[in-house]
Image (cartoon, coloured by chain):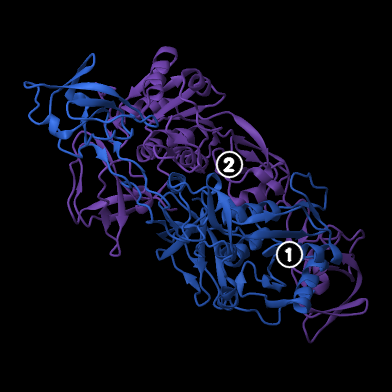
Chain colours: A purple, B blue
């Protein structure tokens, strides 16, 4: 039971945090599991795609010079000596006077150097009549047309798109080197808390932060480790804090176990770098290290927990995973419908709604603990520490909760 | 081996498709699994949050009138008769002259009607000296302050945010009614194709569409069913097409099995509504129904496959899952650096890069089959059917691949 003697600023907290934002090492995953993962190094193609000259149209593989002078009124005729299909090439050789029926994507037979589209032919038995001419190489895709062997296909740090998986598959990359996802241990304590899905007794409340943090961590590319609420005793909390992970998020009630013990443990056995931040909500937030782990003290109140997560833990998790540390929300510049009040000396995370006129309405909220404010809100506005807020009609940047 | 007698327009294809966009039925999932799912119906709270009056500050629960006149220079003293913690309420009654030490979030003891913050007190043994006064109800959170029992908390159709899971958990919703995710069967055929992760022989190519479509379906909230490449025979394809699912995506090579058989099967046993569309790439795309399933014929060429997916299959999967049918890409209005050429009468899906000056560079691509163009591109521009394209300097809307 104490106040904070001296609060750090948000900038001071971020200044301590930024040097910790080191990308994790690489691991490999099958290409089918690589969507939305971050490439750990650049990928060069080990082969040409395609590896063979292919037909780009359905038609007939021919020696181009055989078609010279052919028109609908001056039909030339060739002998059809076989067929070429994708995966089933024609085994023989096309010589002058002969043609091979060919499907789009099929390997061009040896000897042929062009494809006459089917629309410009008429077949009759083993004969094909040519109604037009084609120059050499027409409708033939070259070796390496899509991707040349040795070329750089995807750069390191890229967050893989669906079509990137197609490309990786095409160049026979079976295992993709990606940045390991940070393991994030959620430590929720509080004797008053029941697990999600419970019905609360008269003085109990149900854990809101566990499910919320799990979803936030997954949004940010982390692997959430949340085996359940931790009993409010020192041994259990110490065990949870020293779990095998990269980041620990501690969210407690306001009970003694969390409020005093975790900062103490950090200060004694690791580093309690920041405790108490000039912001609203989330002023009791803190951060530090314990062994190899970055530890975030998130206030138990769910709105403060969300706010402290998004300011500090979120960008850290994204940075460890090789992702952008920028806010993961769309932004919109809009005018204020009403005054947005703040206090100089602290950063405000103000939940706002966007009204029918596309104006920003700050939500009037009595307590910081109103989680439903973050579901009624369309987003939030960050009021910097040197601002008293803004008057109606002034433009603010809104971060939108929905993507 | 044939052309398309008459191509439908993109608008005609969408006009056939839109009436099929019926949201699927509801299912329930545990709240911990509900992130990014779509609520099937509105959620009302079955309880007040909190269910009890609680302290909003650390301090002492008092009878407010006992504090009247207290200042640092006129200290009043109360007997401390116990403690109240979150989850561990004080069992007795606070009467005039007594106080209970209380932590933020703890239930306010009976008899007390205000909390004097710890900063305005000094404790000495069983006595607490008051350095200030508090009015009744100060620093006390009311029953239902966050959520009132019976109030509507989340609307039907909402895509659930991380904080929504916190709210649902708080109001003891264990199972969340969400729209069922559409089951989407991927049917990839082609004798020339090897499964992802293989090294291709001289005339083989590795399946790019399976991994790409799987990722696209997951992006759009569907459940991808992809047991592997389907052998190119009628029985195997028929079995795959009649799998237990809501949507079938057929992507074949250009072999006879796919090109002729699937449209025929649809025409005979279901409906082949559209086959051949005036667009580039993807002109061989088609769609129809087979029993309860919507079937999409996606060209085997990966760029066409991506394009046809995004125009037709993607919005269908999102609509069935209760999501927006709008393009799932960020948009940016930018100026063209060079001419973007198109042809009247067809819709173009033009891959573009954004250069250092934030201008749009159409990618010069010889063939539509260049999948790597979609990885080199930053996004695409849609050129409508009535346009010949646009000149340098004119503004176009770019859909960005990265989110």
Mark 2 lies on residue: A37
Label 1 element class = loop
Residue under mark 2: which chain is it in? A
Judge left or right: residue B56 versus residue B71.
Answer: right
Name the subunit of mark 1: A
Q: Nearer the viewer, mark 2 or mark 1?
A: 2
Q: For the point 57% across and 45% down, which residue is it?
A: A36
Q: Quadrant of residue B298?
A: bottom right
Q: Is residue B133 visible to the viewer in this orientation of the structure?
A: no
Q: Quadrant of residue A14?
A: top left
Instruction: Using the image as rendered, state which of residue A96 and residue A151 is in the foreground.
Output: A151
Q: Is residue B299 visible?
A: yes
Name which residue lies at 38% across and 51% down.
A375
B397 to the left or right of B90: right
In the figure, is residue B182 to the left or right of A264?
right
Q: Nearer the viewer, residue B195 or B270?
A: B270
Q: CA distance from mark 2 to mark 1?
A: 33 Å
- Element at label 2: loop
Q: Earlier in the sequence, mark 2 or mark 1?
A: 2
Q: Position of residue A239 (x, y in %)?
A: 53, 20
Q: Is residue A319 above or below residue B363?
A: above
Residue A133: horizontal and vertical position, in percent? 76, 75
Q: Quadrant of residue A107?
A: bottom right
When the figure is inspected, residue B373 is found, relative to residue A305, above or below; the finding is below
Q: In this figure, what is the number of numbered marks?
A: 2
Instruction: Using a 10 Å C-alpha cutoff, classify the residue at mark 2 as few (fewer than 14 neighbours), some (14 to 19) or many (20 or more).
Output: many
Q: Position of residue A336 (x, y in %)?
A: 23, 55
Mark 1 highlights which residue? A56
Tell which of B152 and A378 is nearer to you.
Answer: B152
């Amino acid at each position: 039971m104490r106040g904070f003697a001296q609060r750090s600023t948000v900038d001071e907290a971020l200044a301590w945090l930024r040097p910790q934002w080191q990308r994790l090492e690489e691991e490999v995953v099958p290409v089918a599991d690589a969507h939305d993962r971050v490439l750990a190094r650049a990928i060069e193609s080990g082969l040409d795609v395609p590896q063979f000259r292919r037909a780009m149209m359905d038609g007939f593989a021919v020696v181009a010079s055989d078609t010279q002078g052919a028109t609908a009124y001056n039909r030339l005729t060739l002998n059809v000596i076989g067929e070429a299909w994708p995966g089933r090439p024609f085994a023989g050789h096309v010589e002058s006077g002969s043609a091979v029926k060919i499907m789009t994507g099929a390997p061009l037979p040896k000897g042929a150097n062009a494809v006459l589209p089917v629309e410009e032919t008429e077949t009759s038995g083993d004969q094909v009549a040519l109604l037009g001419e084609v120059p050499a190489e027409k409708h033939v895709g070259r070796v390496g047309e899509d991707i040349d062997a040795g070329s750089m296909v995807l750069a390191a740090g890229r967050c893989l798109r669906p079509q990137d998986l197609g490309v990786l598959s095409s160049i026979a990359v079976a295992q993709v080197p990606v940045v390991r996802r940070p393991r994030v241990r959620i430590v929720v304590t509080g004797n008053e808390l029941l697990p999600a899905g419970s019905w609360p007794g008269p003085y109990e409340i149900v854990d809101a932060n566990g499910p919320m943090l799990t979803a936030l961590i997954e949004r940010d590319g982390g692997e959430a480790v949340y085996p359940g609420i931790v009993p409010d005793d020192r041994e259990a909390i110490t065990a949870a804090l020293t779990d095998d992970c990269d980041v620990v998020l501690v969210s407690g009630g306001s009970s003694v176990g969390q409020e005093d013990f975790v900062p103490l443990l950090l200060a004694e056995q690791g580093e309690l770098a920041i405790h108490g931040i000039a912001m609203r909500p989330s002023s009791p937030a803190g951060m530090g290290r314990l062994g190899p782990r970055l530890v975030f003290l998130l206030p138990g109140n769910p709105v403060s927990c969300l706010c402290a997560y998004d300011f500090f833990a979120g960008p850290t998790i994204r940075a460890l995973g090789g992702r952008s540390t920028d806010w993961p929300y769309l932004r919109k510049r809009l005018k204020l419908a009403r005054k947005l009040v703040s206090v100089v000396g602290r950063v405000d995370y103000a939940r706002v709604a966007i009204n029918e006129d596309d104006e920003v309405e700050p939500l009037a909220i009595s307590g910081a603990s109103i989680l439903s404010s973050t579901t009624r809100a369309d987003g939030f506005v960050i009021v910097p520490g040197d601002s008293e807020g803004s008057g109606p009609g002034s433009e603010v940047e809104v971060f939108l909760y929905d993507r």
